[in-house]
Image (spheres, helix red, strand yellow):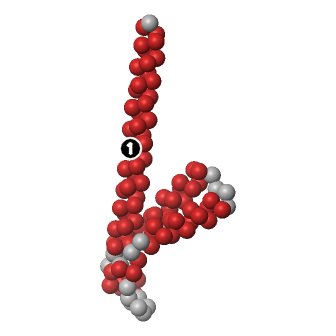
Amino acid sequence: MLRARQIADQIAVAIVNADLIDELAQLSWGTLTALARAVDANSPWTAGHSERVTELSLRIGKAMGLSPQELQLLHQGGLLHDIGKISVPGSVLDKPGKLTEEEFA
């Protein structure tokens, strides 16, 4: 009876841990999506760009037969591919002509 109780307790702990891991994964995806939206919000013409790039990339990746792990990396990369633009002023991102040396720097 004691051994059955120990096994039941271990199973309960494993289930709780699995739930926590799922919650952490969902939080991570939420954070990545929020970052992508923050980047896209820096310029009105880029709204939703990162999510569209991600969706298209995943379709291509699936057609190529990428593994689930590779698709997960592709998903993350698609969302964050423009992360460097988060610190670039909208006036520079939206500028129609060439950048000045100062803007380029």
Which residue type carries mark 1? Glu
Query: Which x, y percent locates residue 44?
Result: 35, 80
Q: Which residue is mark 1?
A: 23
Query: Which x, y percent locates residue 84?
Result: 41, 70
Q: Which quadrant of the view contains residue 39?
A: bottom left
Query: Which x, y percent locates residue 17?
Result: 41, 33
Describe residue 34's horizontal placement relative to residue 3 as left or right.
left
Query: Which x, y percent locates residue 6?
Result: 43, 14
All told, the count of numbered labels is 1
Give whichever of 88, 46 is nearer the camera. Answer: 46
Callout 1: 10 Å neighbours few (<14), some, many (20+)? few
**Quadrant where the N terminus is found in the figure:** top left
Give whichever of 80, 105 is nearer the camera. Answer: 80
Residue farthest toward the right in the current orientation of the protein: 64
Q: Which quadrant of the view contains residue 34?
A: bottom left
Mark 1, secondary structure of its residue: helix
**Quadrant where the C terminus is found in the figure:** bottom left
Point 39% across, 75% down: residue: 47
Residue farthest toward the top in the current orientation of the protein: 1
Q: Which quadrant of the view contains residue 99?
A: bottom left
Point 42% across, 93% down: residue: 97
Give whichever of 75, 105 is nearer the camera. Answer: 75
The relative height of residue 22 versus residue 53 in the rendered view (above or below) is: above
Point 45% across, 24% down: residue: 11
Give whichever of 18, 101 is nearer the camera. Answer: 18
Describe residue 88's horizontal placement relative to residue 81 as left or right.
left
